[in-house]
Amino acid sequence: MASSFELVSQVFNGTISTHTSIPGVPSPPEPSLATAYIGLDMEKMSFREDSHIIVNMQQYNITAETQTSKVFDAATKRFTTYAATTTTGPAPSTQHSCLFYEFPDLAAPADVRKCIEEAASVVKPTGSESGFQTFEFRMPFDMQGTHSTVSEVIYTDASFIVKKIVADVNITSPVNSTSHTEMVDMSSKAGAPDSSLFKIPQEWGTCKETTMPAMPTPESATLQALLRCLGMGPRQSPIVV
């Protein structure tokens, strides 16, 4: 078993399963399609995450399809998010948005990589399961009247290629709720994805610049270290991926 966590270039292209529970509220229907893609290039410090989810609500004759993407590129000092939702049924609609955040104080990609590698190295394995080593991250958040705790367990092989991610979110205010999400790709592989995946597609349209909402310094020491790697001040919001 490894002595600490390592981030390496890789491609993850798997499935998502999720369950949300709110007391007194019926559980939402399970998606008919739910996929996740994660591409990481540690040399260039580029990251992309995509999700594609389709939910059929047959009792209402409604189908909702949502596609989301996140792209971080250290060379351009920019983090871009895209979301598109199409709803069919009695009141069809289509919505999409593209936003980006600038990191003007971000260091050169090589320096960012070294900083993130040092931050990740303090995370120790919590055990092993089915031949994979496990690493757990716990992140409490208090923001704008909402208190929540995120617990994430990452399963990797001996080369730190991610095979499974399990995330549990517990919100205690203003409304109690829990969610359990699993992303699985047992065929994930080492190596950076094609560099074109980190280019912003024209079909996303015009992306608008926005700013991070202010928030207190996160309690997680690992998260604080990652924020410093991104050149972010103590009152700027973290990016959760």
Image (tube, rainbow, N blue to C red):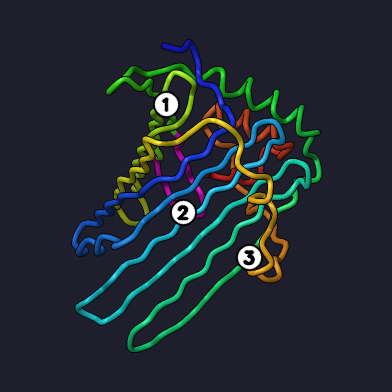
Query: Does 154 appear in magenta?
Result: no
Mark 3 falls on what kind of element?
Answer: strand
Circles 3 and 2, Cβ within 8 Å, touching? The answer is no
Task: Point out which mark residue 156 bears.
Answer: 1
Count of numbered circles on the image = 3
- Label 3, label 2: how far apart the Cα atoms are: 26 Å
Task: Point out which mark residue 98 bears.
Answer: 3
| Residue identified by numbered label 2 | 145
Report the magenta residues as a range: 139-149
Q: Determine the image quadrant of residue 137.
A: top left
Q: Determine the image quadrant of residue 224.
A: top right
The picture places residue 87, in percent across and down from the top left corner, at 40, 78
Q: Nearer the viewer, residue 182 or 199?
A: 199
Q: Name the residue located 70 percent from the left edge and 54 percent from the top edge.
A: 199
Q: Nearer the viewer, residue 5 or 40?
A: 40
- Label 1, label 2: how far apart the Cα atoms are: 35 Å
